[in-house]
Amino acid sequence: MDYSEPRRDFLKKLGLAGATFSAASLMDPVYAAELKGELKKIKHLSPEDAAQDEGFWRFIQQSYTVSATLTNLNNGGVSPQPKVVQDAFERFNRLCNEAPSYYMWRVLDKGREPIRQKLAHLAGCDPEEIAINRNTTEALETIIFGLNLEEGDEIVLSKYDYPNMMNSWKQREKRDGIVLKFIDLDMPMEDDKVIVKRYETAFTSKTKIVHITHMINYTGQILPAKAITAAAHKKGIEVILDGAHTFAHIEYNLKDINCDYFGTSLHKWLCAPFGTGFMFVRKEKIASMWTMFSNDNPKSDDIRKFEVLGTRSFPTEQGIGKAFDFHQSIGGKRKEERLRYLKNYWANQVKDLPKVKLYTSFDPKYSCALCTFGIEGMEPGDINAYLFDKYKIHTTPINHEAVHGVRVTPHVYTTLYDLDRLVKAIKEMAA
């Protein structure tokens, strides 16, 4: 295949090392026109009604290149990218391979600032508070290990926080003598006051940080982050928010939540290239945080000090822009309601079955796409194996604290046919 003509067009639009870079030219004009036409058909519908317009969602489903023989219901782990994102990544990658150090550092490196602005727009914060990195773990560990804490300082977290984060805190406990205080949660919980009280009862005069998982990985439980943050701030306690499963999944605003630190992955619900994420640090707290990777001014108040990683994958990073565009085309609230509709579609059909237990709320305030179910008399691994061996449905088993079942996470490309097969399988196992 001759790439010379496409490359010349690409470089012309790119402007080489000149103006601000945009990936807008990488969308197929035919596809863009079709998407525009489909969006026009549903523009009069509310997000809730649009969530049930199967014609529109069939078009979105065809925007992905997912397997026709394996049903992926583990999008909570990592989601596939729509074709427009894959195409953008591949073209950036081919460009970089023509002269890596030139195109990576003198051309594509200039594209980070527009991406920073797009992510800030989606998160509802200042671009100068966002550092682009590779995933939630990198973001939150940079924060956890960068905070100035002393022996005896207390950290409040829950038994349902993500393992990587708990292990990071445990390492600081061993290294620095800080004290970890774990609270317990019920699954599901549907009362803000009760949830906030669980955290408040653990606060003391020595509490410095409260670590909140916005959406619990194991069940999809959404915690009232804004209310917990307000309660913590009244005591002078800083708040770290783990947004791995909420960013580009449900609509919210970081300035409204008012947390001090935040981290998320973009290869989950935003469907960006694998190995993309970002961290948020309130502007006034950047200078006091240490960096994970050394640089010439670790006490700088410039958020970019956290991006000194050495050589990175520029094609991967630049693909974030196209994922943002795709997300915005669908509409954040419309996408959220579709994801919630898909969860409710299958969960409502099995919730009253004998032996079936749901660990996830149906209240939209406390749940969206993620939902975990168990079956009396069956181990999570056995349920997971049955779904895959008989129906080629890929899920993930959960065996943590009081949750014993299988987590189901559809995405916008998931069809009702896929979920009907899931329901059929659950009915067989429950019988």
Image (spheres, rainbow, N blue to C red):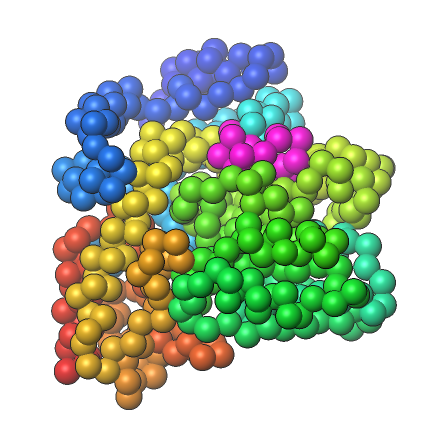
Expressed as whole percent of the image width and height from the top left, the position of residue 296 reads 85, 37
Judge whether 78 appears above or below 375 on screen: above
Pick whichever, 161 or 110, lies toward us: 161
Horizontally, is 26 left or right of 424 in the view?
right
Judge whether 24 appears above or below 183 on screen: above
Pick whichever, 71 or 400, lies toward us: 400
Q: Quadrant of the N terminus?
A: top left
- For image coordinates 66% across by 70% down, the residue present is 202
Q: Is residue 57 something that shows in the picture?
A: no
Expressed as whole percent of the image width and height from the top left, the position of residue 321 reads 47, 30
- Residue 141 falls within the magenta-colored stretch: no
- For image coordinates 21% across by 24% down, the residue present is 40
Q: Which image quadrant is residue 54 in?
A: top left
Horizontally, is 130 left or right of 318 in the view?
right
Extreme residue toward the bottom, this view = 377
Judge whether 338 appears above or below 409 on screen: above
- Residue 124 falls within the magenta-colored stretch: yes
- For image coordinates 30% across by 55% down, the residue present is 410
- For image coordinates 44% across by 17% down, the residue present is 10
Expressed as whole percent of the image width and height from the top left, the position of residue 129 reads 66, 35
Q: Quadrant of the C terminus?
A: bottom left
Tell me which segment is drawn in magenta. Answer: 118-135
Expressed as whole percent of the image width and height from the top left, the position of residue 30 reads 24, 21
Q: Is residue 236 something that shows in the picture?
A: yes
Horizontally, is 98 left or right of 129 in the view?
left
Q: Which image quadrant is residue 43 in?
A: top left
